[in-house]
Image: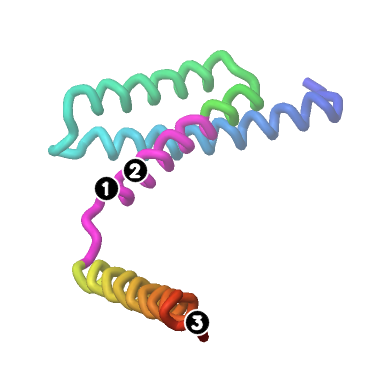
Amino acid sequence: MILNPSQDSELKQQRAAIKEAGRLIKRLDAMMRDPFATPARLSELKKWQSDLIDNNLRGDSVTITRGVEQVEGYLTDEKKAAEAIKPRPLPDIHKEQAEHYRRANEQRKRDDERFTRNSPRNQPK
């Protein structure tokens, strides 16, 4: 079977997309083995995995790539959310509070100086 260049290019793109989707499917499979995963999380991962498999069977390279990017986007968003709710280290909290108090004290000193300078009692008679 002889393919024209556009068909050959599409075939190569589709194979690359399927390979990438296969890696993501394996990653989702590994995530489903997590003993602490809730049933809702397992069903979500299973749905994503089955959607990727359906794309591999019925879709072209654009559809497969779009599905992979969408699932990777979901995983990235979850990772960012997990990092956001992670407790901050105590030294970072202390450092931030010290900086806040230092700035507040400097501002209070500037305000006191300005109020003293502009006070009616400080004006010449």
Q: In this rendered view, identify the residue nearer to me: 112 or 59.
A: 112
Tell me the tag on residue 29.
none
Q: Residue at x 13, y 38 (%)?
A: 35
The quarter of the displayed image where residue 42 is located: top left
Q: Which residue is mark 2?
A: 81
At mark 1, the secondary structure is helix
The quarter of the displayed image where residue 111 is located: bottom left
User: Of the residues tagged 2 and 3, which is closer to the observer?
Assistant: 3
Tell me the tag on residue 123.
3
What is the CA distance from the residue labelled 1 to the residue labelled 3? 54 Å
Q: Residue at x 36, y 39 (%)?
A: 78
Look at the numbered discs 1 and 2 and tell me whether their residues touch, using CB distance below 8 Å.
yes
Q: In this rendered view, identify the residue nearer to me: 79 or 20.
A: 79
What is the CA distance from the residue labelled 1 to the residue labelled 2? 6 Å
Q: Amino acid under label 2?
A: Ala
Q: In this rendered view, identify the residue nearer to me: 59 or 94.
A: 94
Q: Amino acid under label 3?
A: Gln
At mark 2, the secondary structure is helix
At mark 3, the secondary structure is loop
Circle 2 crowding by C-alpha within 10 Å: few under 14, some 14–19, many from 20: few
Q: In this rendered view, identify the residue nearer to me: 12 or 96.
A: 96
Q: Amino acid under label 1?
A: Ile
Of the image marks 1 and 3, the number of the one nearer the N terminus: 1
Of the image marks 2 and 3, the number of the one nearer the N terminus: 2
Task: Check the image and name the residue furthest to the front.
Answer: 125
- Boundaries of the magenta span: 68-89
In the rendered view, does 96 fall on the left or right side of 64? left
Q: Where residue 41 appears, x then y in whole percent?
A: 25, 28
Whether residue 78 is in magenta: the answer is yes
